[in-house]
Amino acid sequence: MLGRITDDAHPADVNSRRGLAAAILMGVVGPEVFIVQPGFVQGLVEQLGFDDRGAGYTASAEMFGIAATTILMTFIASRLNWRRVFALSLITMFAANAACTFTSSIDAFVALRFVAGLGAGGLVSLSFAAIGLTNNPDRNFGYLIMWVLIYGALGLLAMPSVYEVAGMDGVLWFFAVFPLIALPFVRDLPLSGETAVAVDVDAVTLPAGLKSMALLAMLAYFLAQGVVWAYLFLIGTTGGLDNQQVANGLMLSQFAGIAGAFTAALAGNRFGRSMPLTLGIAAGALCLWFLVGEFSFLVFALATAIYNFAWNMTHPFLLASMASFDARGRVVVYAVAMQMIGLAIGPGLAASVVHNGYFVNVNKLGAALFVLSLLLILPPVLAGARKLRPLPASAGALE
């Protein structure tokens, strides 16, 4: 059956429209739960009766599954048949999500979320690699980000209505069926690919201490994202908004995220990296102070829109910085691992500071981690810029 799905004899070109569409589809299906995690966590609390902490730990379990597979693929992807990994990942996600509708055990549910994450991690890792093999990866990663955020906007908008009509099982069955839709496209993906890191033209080799600071900055930044993103829906409802208002605000924020990603793509390295990183990370921290206590829909919508804009503008600059910190391009590989570890630990870390249904400590923790990440990333970024200044004008203009 697996051989029939993968059709290893079928030629595929990831630069063709069908091949690129297949890779992008896998990149959307992989994080299908994480992208709508605020709505999913809300469902765990309101539909399944999880307490706030239990919901956070459950979200964290799935992210640990994604992180585990993503890190593993960094080392073994070049030795595997990619189509078979894609197919097995999709089937695993279907089985784990479907099984969640049949269990009443919380422990079994959490274990199944981890298994679903294992499958999702295979898709995230290899779809990223496949798009990286295209002739125009910068543009194509832009398309991927766009479709991921559109999916997130529509998903967050629809989830309250789905909960009313079909409960948590309706959402879980969507998460189960969506991967099956992608199965016919597996044959259009590469069988394998050489692992190649695209090294930035302004790459410099920094001392080990500065590289370590950069990697810790990546960990701190995505710890902050994992802390805040999982509880953003519940922060909204605790602030006095109803479920649909929160869903509408988060949907609008996804479109702001699209604008943030394309702002980074248009700006490139034209203004250096220290300025956009400072603005983006600081904006993420400041937004959280407006989401304390009770607030209006307008405040929530604006704060989450700026937050998501800043996140999706900052992320490309962080990755570009990591790529420039080592002329051999290895730092960016470790940085992606730090990203997934941060997103995995974040929800559980946030759960440990939730107190009696109030989330002010989540906001404080997220803001503190954002500030820490900014303090850690600026020294290596500025050091890299200083190393480039003595270069001829044609090279120095790149920074």
Image (cartoon, grey):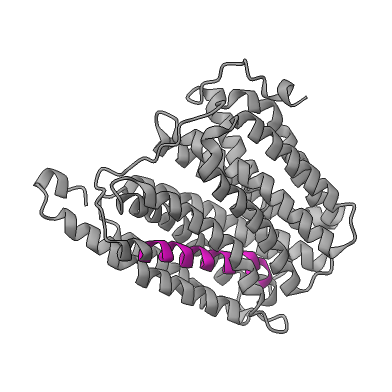
Q: Position of residue 139 (x, y in %)?
A: 42, 36
**208 and 179: which is toward the camera:** 208
**215 and 165: which is toward the camera:** 215
Q: Quadrant of the N terminus?
A: top right
Is 304 left or right of 321, judged from the image as shown? right
Is 152 left or right of 176, judged from the image as shown? left
Q: Position of residue 165 (x, y in %)?
A: 86, 53
Quick check: 123 above or below 71? above
Q: Main secondary structure of the magenta part?
A: helix
Residue 304 seen anywhere in this rendered image of the structure: yes
Is 31 left or right of 106, judged from the image as shown? left
Quick check: 151 above or below 164? above
Residue 165 seen anywhere in this rendered image of the structure: no
Q: Position of residue 170 (x, y in %)?
A: 83, 50
Look at the image and say whether residue 266 sits in the magenta stretch.
no
Q: Position of residue 340 (x, y in %)?
A: 55, 56
**55 and 195: which is toward the camera:** 195
**What is the count of numbered marks?**
0
Range of magenta residues: 213-234
Which quadrant of the view contains residue 106? bottom right
Residue pictured at 68% horizontal, 70% vertical: 234
Look at the image and say whether residue 226 sits in the magenta stretch.
yes
Residue pictured at 61% horizontal, 60% vertical: 250
Residue pictured at 60% horizontal, 23% vertical: 188
